[in-house]
Amino acid sequence: MSLLEKTIKSIEPVNSQLERKAQQHLDNLTKPRGSLGRLEEFARRYCSIIGDLDPPYPRKVICVFAGDHGVAEEGVSAFPKEVTFQMVRNFLSGGAGINVLARHVGAEVRVVDIGVDHDLSGLPGLILRKVAWGTANFTKGPAMTREQAIAAIEVGIEIAREMVASGFRLLGTGEMGIANTTPASAITAVLCSESPETVTGRGTGIDQKAWQKKVEVIRAGIALNQPDPTDPIDVLAKVGGFEIGGICGFILGAAAQGCPVVLDGFISSAGALVAYRLAPQVSQYLFAGHCSVEQGHRVQLSHMGLSPIIDLNLRLGEGTGAALAMGLIEAGLKIYKEMATFSGAGVSPGSEAEDMGP
Ligand SMILES: O=C(O)c1ccc[n+]([C@@H]2O[C@H](COP(=O)([O-])O)[C@@H](O)[C@H]2O)c1
Ligand SMILES: Cc1cc2nc[nH]c2cc1C
């Protein structure tokens, strides 16, 4: 059995009994029941995913998967593709947006070259797992072979395993890849049965004319390659990207290890969609970190039944929304672990605390 098959098979449903018990504890804390809203949801879901009603504060990491895209030559991005490898260097020097926000919430950052079209070997700190030197232009043929799609997913699975083995217990997705909103839109259109114009946005900031071209490029790529919507690996191979495959595997690998994953934006969620269609139970392990400005992001999240933690008009990617959301998940956990109970603090519980319904 392949690593991918084994991983999918080993993903268990999250223990709903534990989630109920965690909520019972939250209901004993000195506050009206439910009054900390979604912070309570973050805490009870974290406990049930981890499988521990008294979990330690997690070590947190954002893994940034970087890849290039042949379709960039169609003029679908506001920036040249060299920015992908230039930003990888910036991540490793600690100066990018994700480095700042990860430091803000006490998360570490790891950077994975899974398909950058540049020789990055020898860069200190870089995890070199290149599947290929960028994808092919999907308006001329498939973006990658099926074997490469599986290889990219398996890189992600291995990275998730390595993160859990290193002691991280809250993982965040991040990505970097000039033009990658184009494959993310194509995947979303196919897997969510939506038209390209419904799920395509302006990415790094293209104008209306370039947006129309981008929609046409996506339409042409789908028409030429005919990705099979019932076969998520076929969709990834024909119109996807290596970093999207890596994120898909990262989610599968984390879920198989019983570890929660915080999603970043539109591209990360395209990877999540592929994972979700391979193993729908992964959605139980996911926190939607934020809702991106990209118009297709809401479509993706509602397809997976996820509700974003924050909505701050972010559209940077890199893992920035995931990092910020980690701070709120941890805030929920702090409430769960540190707040006094009614009996402990000598506060009268009121009638509602007697009723421990679901
Ligand atoms: O995370 C998002 O929702 C998001 C939305 C728009 C752009 N991005 C980032 O911008 C790049 C892709 O934009 P583009 O226009 O080159 O397709 C890529 O490096 C992403 O990290 C990310
Ligand atoms: C500068 C820059 C930084 C990014 N980070 C993620 N995507 C990006 C795209 C650009 C253009």
Image (tube, rainbow, N blue to C red):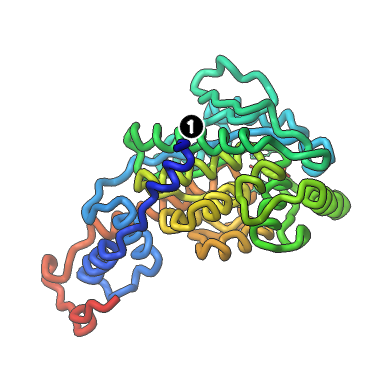
- The image quadrant that residue 349 belongs to is bottom left
Relative to 105, say whether 96 is above or below: above
Pick out the residue farthest to the bottom: 351
Counting from the top left corner in percent of width and height, residue 262 is at: 46, 50
Q: Residue at point 11% right, 65% down? A: 344
For residue 27, side relative to residue 300 (left or right)? left
Of residues 143 and 118, the one nearer the viewer is 143
Of residues 108 and 166, the one nearer the viewer is 166
For residue 60, side relative to residue 303 (left or right)? left
Residue 120 in sight here: yes
Pick out the residue farthest to the top: 122
Counting from the top left corner in percent of width and height, residue 239 is at: 71, 45
Task: Look at the numbered disc 1 and give the secondary structure of its residue.
Answer: strand
If the picture is divided into quarters, which one holds ligand 2?
A: top right
Counting from the top left corner in percent of width and height, residue 80 is at: 77, 33
Q: Quadrant of the N terminus?
A: top left
Of residues 241 and 308, the one nearer the viewer is 241
Relative to 246, say whether 10 is above or below: below
Counting from the top left corner in percent of width and height, residue 299 is at: 63, 63
Residue 207 in sight here: no
Pick out the residue farthest to the front: 1
Q: Quadrant of the C terminus?
A: bottom left
Query: Which kind of residue does numbered mark 1 sit on?
Result: Arg
Q: Name the residue that disc number 1 marks.
A: 110
Tell me the crowding category of disc 1: few under 14, some 14 to 19, or many 20 or more residues within 10 angstroms, Cα based. some
Q: Residue at point 26% right, 65% down? A: 17
Q: Residue at point 51% right, 25% down? A: 127
Q: Is mark 1 within 8 Å of ligand 1?
A: no
Q: Residue at point 77% right, 51% down? A: 222
Of residues 347 and 300, the one nearer the viewer is 300
- The image quadrant that residue 72 belongs to is top right
For residue 32, side relative to residue 104 (left or right)? left
